[in-house]
Amino acid sequence: MTVQRSERFDADVERQFRWYLIERDLDPVDGLALATRFAEAVDAALELLRRSPEIGRGRFRTYPDLAGTRSWRLRKPFHRFMIFYRLQGGFLSAERLLEGHTRLAGGR
């Protein structure tokens, strides 16, 4: 299965990566290490989903325009982030990367 990352997904990843680099009160080397670990956790989750795309939890059953959306959490310590994706033919489309406590349906 091929993974496609939407522009919004990449923007979500970049925003969080930059937050670890800039907004955290960390030494620049430590901030870069944390941001890199975050990016690696995203890549590892996408690889797991590529190999086993059905493992994600089905979401948003009451919203027709979001039908077929699934979610998967990143590994600890980044487990508050969820990947929202859809399976379309032979593709896994990574749509968004959001914090799990965000109002998911309202902020699509």
Image (cartoon, rainbow, N blue to C red):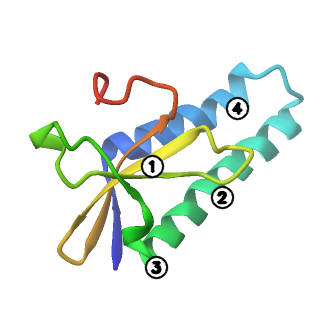
Give the class, few, some or many, for how many residues have Cα within 10 Å of label 3's Cα (few <14, many ≥20).
few
| Number of dots carrying numbers | 4
Q: Mark 1 or 2, which is nearer the eye?
A: 1
Disc 2 secondary structure class: helix
For badge 3, the amino acid type reads Arg
The residue singled out by tag 3 in the image is 51
Q: Residue furthest front?
A: 62
Mark nearer the N terminus (2 vs 4): 4
For badge 4, the amino acid type reads Tyr
Distance of mark 1 from mark 3, alpha carbons? 15 Å
Distance of mark 1 from mark 2, alpha carbons? 14 Å
The residue singled out by tag 4 in the image is 20
Q: Who's the residue at 64% across and 27% down the image?
A: 19
The residue singled out by tag 1 in the image is 83
Residue 37, percent from left and from top: 73, 51
Q: Is residue 73 above or below residue 87?
A: above
Front position in the image: 31 or 41: 41
Q: Who's the residue at 17% across and 37% down the image?
A: 62
Front position in the image: 40 or 50: 50
The residue singled out by tag 2 in the image is 40
Give the class, few, some or many, for how many residues have Cα within 10 Å of label 2's Cα (few <14, many ≥20).
few
Distance of mark 3 from mark 4, alpha carbons? 29 Å
For badge 1, the amino acid type reads Ile
Give the class, few, some or many, for how many residues have Cα within 10 Å of label 1's Cα (few <14, many ≥20).
many
User: Seen in the image, is 30 located left or right of residue 37?
Assistant: right
Mark nearer the N terminus (3 vs 2): 2
